[in-house]
Image (spheres, rainbow, N blue to C red):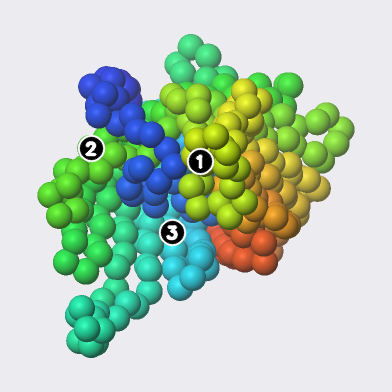
Amino acid sequence: MRHFVISLIISFFLLADSSFAQLGGSYSFSVLNIAPTARMAALGNSTNATTGTDVGMAFYNPALSVDSMHQHIMLSYQNYLADINIGYVGYAWKLRKYGTLSGHILYNDFGTFVKTDITGKSYGTFHPSDLIFQISYGQVHPKDDRFTVGGSIKFLYSNYERYIATVFAIDAGAAFHNPEKLFNAAVLIRNAGWNAIPYDNVRSPLPFDIQLGLSKKLAHNPLRFTMVAHNLQQFDITYVNTNLRNKNIDLSTGQVQYEKASFGEKMMRHFNFGAELVFSPNFQLRGGYNYQRRKELSPESGKGSAGFSWGLGIGIKKFTLDYAMVCYFPGLWTSTFTVSKNIQDFKRIKPVNM
């Protein structure tokens, strides 16, 4: 299995040149960046370093495929924007002393669309969708159990009426865990790959992303802070909205002058923040703030709660239930429901002979 991770890392360097892309809507397959579980959604996509039994974390960062996930299964449903519905299932298995393997499937359904011709006449419907298959593997470093490394292989099949595309991509990650200090850190490379079959013979770049994540829980306190710095491969990820209503016009030239982002603004676009109140293994409260989401998706005035998220986790009869609400636009919230279970709990208890 060590050769599996090494091969993924080598493949990343071979594919990196074709993976870099400008942001601001110039790449396709953004479904690869969707937070699959309620916990990740509630924390504003601000966690890629926290370990535990959450199999969805292994989907996002393969270095978090750890022994504690053994035989845990996770099901998630997300009522996304408009009529989009997203389903996710993940399962992890410990390979004895060879690490932990996990399998994941994510399905993105865009709903029903009506086919029309240029005159507006209807002639049927179609159902565009995305389907991701992923295998992740993680292993503890043989000389220092505070370090874990991992890799993922993913396949994406996208079907938009007569337009079909397929994508092969890999992730590679490394994580550091210090249980004494209640501190975790991770480095993650996501979505390095290629568009094998492009839409209408036009190849599109993938949402390549290099991330750094930190997680710190306070001693004698239920509060845990999380932070992710994303898209570190490109400093300026700001988007210039040319459709702003309130525009500044240069009176001498008549040209539109768009406000330039400051150094601090460009830096802040890279950070997502989250906080988690871990009262017990059976009850947690969560909140998150996604700065880039707030800046790009909120209107010019009245930003409201755009970019914020919240959620909770509850343990009931050996099931873990998680819920999250995420605000993308003032008054427009999405909901995510997740249930997870250790299937070993289903095993019958052998009777004791008296």
Residue drawn at 35 percent across, 33 percent down: 21
Among numbered discs 2 and 3, the one appearing first in the sequence: 3
How many neighbours does mark 3 have within 10 angstroms: few (below 14), some (14-19), or many (20 or more)? Answer: many
- The Cα atoms of the two marked residues, 2 and 1, are separated by 43 Å
In the drawing, does residue 317 fall left or right of residue 98?
Answer: right
Among numbered discs 1 and 3, the one appearing first in the sequence: 3
Residue underneath mark 1: 254
Q: Do the residues labelled 1 and 3 touch (CB within 8 Å)?
A: no
Extreme residue in the left direction: 201
- What residue type is disc 2 on? Trp
Among numbered discs 2 and 1, the one appearing first in the sequence: 2
x and y percent of residue 217 in the render? 75, 32
- Which of the 4 image quadrants contains residue 264? top right
Q: Can residue 346 be seen in this view?
A: no
- What residue type is disc 1 on? Gly
Extreme residue in the right direction: 220
Q: What element carries label 2?
A: strand
x and y percent of residue 250 in the render? 56, 37
Q: What element carries label 3?
A: strand
- What residue type is disc 3 on? Tyr
Quadrant of the image for the N terminus?
top left
Residue underneath mark 3: 88
Q: What element carries label 1?
A: loop
Disc number for residue 194: 2
- The Cα atoms of the two marked residues, 2 and 3, are separated by 23 Å
